[in-house]
Image (cartoon, helix red, strand yellow):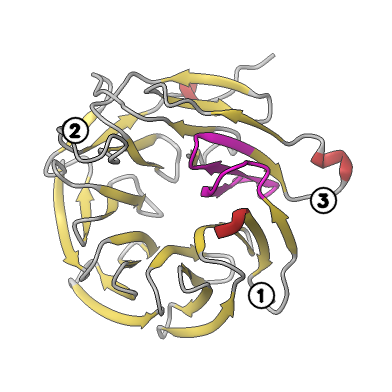
Amino acid sequence: MINSPDWGRNYVCANMFYKWHVFSKYLLGTQDLRAEIYRFSPNTSQFLLVCSWDTSVRLYDVPANSMRLKYQHTGAVLDCAFYDPTRAWSGGLDHQLKMHDLNTDQENLVGTHDAPIRCVEYCPEVNVMVTGSWDQTVKLWDPRTPCNAGTFSQPEKVYTLSVSGDRLIMGTAGRRVLVWVLQNMGYVQQRRESSLKYQTRCIRAFPNKQGYVLSSIEGRVAVEYLDPSPEVQKKKYAFKCGSDGFVNIWDPFNKKRLCQFHRYLTSIASLAFSNDGTTLAIASSYMYEMDDTEHPEDGIFIRQVTDAETKPKST
């Protein structure tokens, strides 16, 4: 589940068991790569950063269909983020937070958590890197030095983070949702409980900063608003995302599906839009829903999306 940054209205819901289709370009060298998450460069759709359970972080040149760079952790890499077009940050099961210079291929061990790092995010409004860990802490990092700029205890393990302006929206174990202001981490701005029954898997903020979308492990999606007033809270709702084998693009404000893509070879592990909203990267990677059985090889596919697929129709 991700948001389309260009229009701030549409969200993609990835269901299970996808098949490849002719509208996507296969990214070479991604077979047998169980991608966990990936990000496009902040200023171009040319470069795609991919982190994987094979302990690697890779930089791909999308138009050239080639891998530019690869570096390693000592455990599965669970998240990565660009600080700027030339520096990437990553963390995972080895508890280590790394910064890698993509021009010089030099890396810096910035710091550690006491348990696996699940989330790595950059907040440009505050110019701070944010990490969330299963050690029940969130840490802020000054990317200029780089160094730790604060450690903040959480009530449960951190499963997902999303930056919304200067606010941090966090999902933890116990179905908790916490909203912080990054300039003042001394208190929690909002404490919520997920409206979904099962464990939170992913949170992504609206680009217009008015709310967020939350998904859970059983395949339901909730559309939530940050304004706590009863009038605004009446707008929130939830729906079933499927397990029907398709990628869907939604207009969450009008509660309408705009487009459904064809199936891919196997499960969808992650999705990412380029910052201009024109390119969608899709990781087709078996998620062991049926245990360790024979399955199609993993791969990353690149799809150029159109206005007809992603913009709400005028009424």
Residue occupied by mark 2: 26
289 magenta-colored? no
Left or right: 132 in relation to 289: right
Figure quadrant of residue 279? top left
Q: Can residue 204 be seen in this view?
A: yes
Q: In this view, does 193 lie above or below 312?
A: below
**In the figure, 140 relative to 57: above or below?**
below
Could you tell which of marks 1 and 3 lies nearer the N-terminus? 1
Q: What residue type is labelled 2?
A: Tyr
Tell me where residue 17 sits by quadrant.
top left
Residue 283 in the image: state x and y as whole percent.
29, 39
Q: Nearer the viewer, residue 193 or 151?
A: 193
Q: Three-letter amino acid code at disc 3?
A: Pro
Decide if residue 202 is in sight here.
no
Q: Tell me, for residue 228, which label it has, or none.
A: 3
Please tell me how crowded label 3 is: few (under 14), some (14-19), or many (20+) other residues with Cα within 10 Å: few
Residue 203 at x, y percent in the picture: 55, 49
Write down the region rendered in magenta.
Answer: 194-222
Q: In which quarter of the image is residue 270?
A: top left
Q: For the residue carrying disc 2, how many other residues have a C-alpha within 10 Å: few (<14), some (14-19), or many (20+)?
A: many
Amino acid, disc 1: Gln
Label 1 Cα neighbours within 10 Å, binned few <14 / some 14-19 / many ≥20: few
